[in-house]
Image (tube, helix red, strand yellow):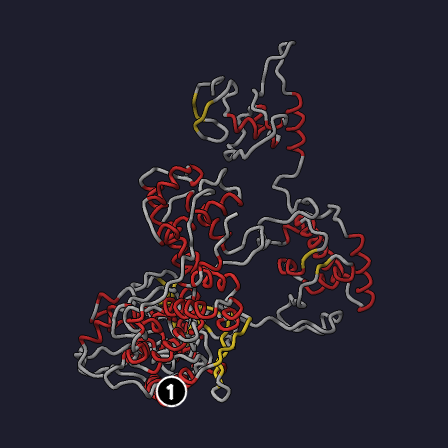
Amino acid sequence: MRTYPERGVCPRCRHEAHLNTDGLCKPCLSAIRAEGDAEWALGLEEARPRPVQLTVGGTYGDRSVSSRPLRRPAKNGSKVGKEWWTRLRQQRAAPAGPPVLEAQVRGQIPLFTVPRVLGDATVSAIVGRPVDGWQRARPVIEAIEAEHKMSPGWRRKVAEMVRLALAVREAEGAERLPEAMLRDLPSNGDAVRLVLLRAGLLEEAGRPMRFSISDQPSRTPYITAPAPLPPRAPRQCTDCWDWIPVARRAGFVCDPCRHWRERTGRGRCCRCGRDGLALRGGRCRGCHPYRLLDDARPASRRFTQLLISLPAGKGGPFEAFPVGEAQEPNYDERRPALHTSRGQEALFALRRDWAPVLARLRSAPAGEPPLTANARLLVEEFARARPGQRPDYKKNTRTLTILMYWLGAEAAVLERDVYDLARIDANLAAKPVCQFLRSCGLLVEDPELHRDRDQMWVESAVAALPEPAASQVRTWVKVMREQGPREGEPRGYDGIRRYLAHLQPILTTWTATAGVTSLREITKRQVEDAVDGVSGYARRGLATALRSLFRALKRERVVFRNPARDLPVGDIKGIPKSIPSDLMMGLLDQATTPLGRLVVALAAVHALPGKEMQRLHTSGLDLSRGTLEVRRGLLRHTLYLEELTHQLAADWTAYRHHRWPLSCNPHLMVTQKTAVDPDHPAVSIGTLRGALPRGLTLSGLRQDRILNEAAQSADPLRLMRLFGVTEQTAMRYVTAAHPERTSKLPR
């Protein structure tokens, strides 16, 4: 542009650009040399315009794409153009027309594969051209001609098609011609397939293909076992757009339209606007039955019903749709909603909005919504499966009734729909309905609803942070899950959530207030200021989480230094404390349920943690031997029940069997919900804590029991055998109970 600032319209590409002394733009100068365009290189008047050249890129040392001027004054005063005149004579001597089936580089994979249009003109264009593979195919044709006594005309026709197929093979750049490309040949596809197959020039398809539409054993004796014809697909009538079944005759016009054409003239339909159709009364065959509706309701002129051409039906003329008196709808008649059939797939997968459905049911008369016969049977079976449900507590049954009313019992129900329906009304429930539908094979599960809650919370909390701090925290989560380069015991998402709950306020303050974009900017002073703002257990938890975060980032080489390396944490465990005796008075009397008394006995007598109480199984309780097996991962710890705990365990098992005789939950402790839940979940830790009297905790009762035993025996081995604790835990309790026995003597 600096050399030729003048702008104008290039005569070759007809686009406005910067023109040089030849009057051409830069892309056209490169195209003339790259394509060898002699007419425009010499500037002939009869040269026709060319398409604009798209330049993708080029090599600086390639002179073929140079944009230097074409005609420059030479030393002798003449113009440089001799080589272009020679090239022009060669181009004009060549046959006119673009190259036909030009050979490509062998082994090159085509970017786009489109069907070719091959005909007599293509065959004439390759006459006399040497085709690779013809010397191998020619003896095969002569052998088949002699073997089956075929005519010379058959040999010439098949030879033309074989040469055409070999030319297509060269144009595709393939070592062997794919069998599917023989469909593009004008004729004799089966004979060409046999010739190329014997010559080793054909790549067979996975299943033998056939190219003739009819059986001709007398004319094709060389084909002993022809491949079956492909099934005929349904097609659409070109006149009325009706779908023609497979078993009908060939063609794209149905039988009624074929007879309709014989008695009427052609023109433009006044209703659908299509031209070239057979008309009667100004309407085509598809619009003719709507003539009375058009006169009564002119607004319906643009719509036509899509039909299916059935093989048998009512004879006679195509009668018009009757137009009677408008009938008022009966709003008092309640009918089920329209449902999809079994196996019918949705055209668009959209999330349903159940608010209009509930509004429609609330505005309807009182009573249950109308259901189909199958839906009614399904609801009754669900009610029988829950015999203990109160008459006034039918949120589960009502949820299933609404689903069956709107969706029906024929198609499967999406699990997401059940939860969306239950979310907008507190009087509806989702989980029992999903369990019942799953047992009946009518539920399509949603994987997003079965993800770990702690994992979802961690992902949402990390996503709320700005980048790149969010990606750095994700790296820490990955290390905690032991998915990094080093192996170790993976941490659960519940523990990661507790750590991140301490870190979230500090990370938000750093990124939002302090203007920190990356954790690499955090200094030791900022870490100490964050910890100094809290105290007690909150300080210990925050300090532990910060040390874990920066230690993992330093190990993964995300940060250059660890600012929390020397951060003091303090005593995480703390000193065990006993419970005052006034709170322990009448402890069993304060527990009002059999479950509560058993929880108190296991925590206060056997020092059993709440997590281990949740995992107790009925198979681990042996009342005849007075033992209870506790599951601790792959290990097992046996509790020997004394008389009090033995009696409380017997009372609880009797109460459970009397209250829920059909319960299949394998856990020893159950509630009203978990006893009949088909998923057999364990009782929640909140239920166990709620069974204790006010002011007491499970961990407090456990510490008091172990501390009392340590004060009586002062033997760590006894604590390990009795409560199944580790040696470090046993020594910690012995130290707390007898500090004088474990103190270090002065030197």
Q: Position of residue 49 (x, y in %)?
A: 50, 32
Compared to residue 180, the image places residue 650 above or below, namely: below
Farthest front residue in view: 747
Answer left or right for 495 relative to 233: left
Q: Which residue is mark 1?
A: 651
Compared to residue 610, the image places residue 74 above or below, namely: above
Q: How many marks?
A: 1
- Decide which of 105, 527 is in the foreground and name it: 527
Answer left or right for 500 relative to 127: left
Name the image quarter holding residue 75: top right
Q: Amino acid at mark 1?
A: Asp
Farthest top residue in view: 76
Within 10 angstroms of label 1, few (less than 14), some, or many (20 or more) residues?
some
Answer left or right for 520 relative to 28: left
Compared to residue 440, the image places residue 138 above or below, namely: above
Name the image quarter holding residue 87: top right
Residue at x 82%, y 58% (from the top left corner): 139
Residue at x 65%, y 33% (from the top left corner): 91
- Asked whether the viewer can see residue 259, the reply is no
Answer left or right for 604 relative to 635: left
Residue at x 64%, y 50% (from the top left corner): 122
Q: Position of residue 477 (x, y in %)?
A: 47, 52
Q: Position of residue 283 (x, y in %)?
A: 31, 67
- Asked whether the viewer can see residue 668, the reply is yes
Residue at x 67%, y 65% (from the top left corner): 206
- Decide which of 36, 653 is in the foreground and name it: 653
SS of the residue at dot 1?
Answer: helix
Q: Position of residue 187 (x, y in %)?
A: 65, 61
Compared to residue 510, the image places residue 436 above or below, namely: below
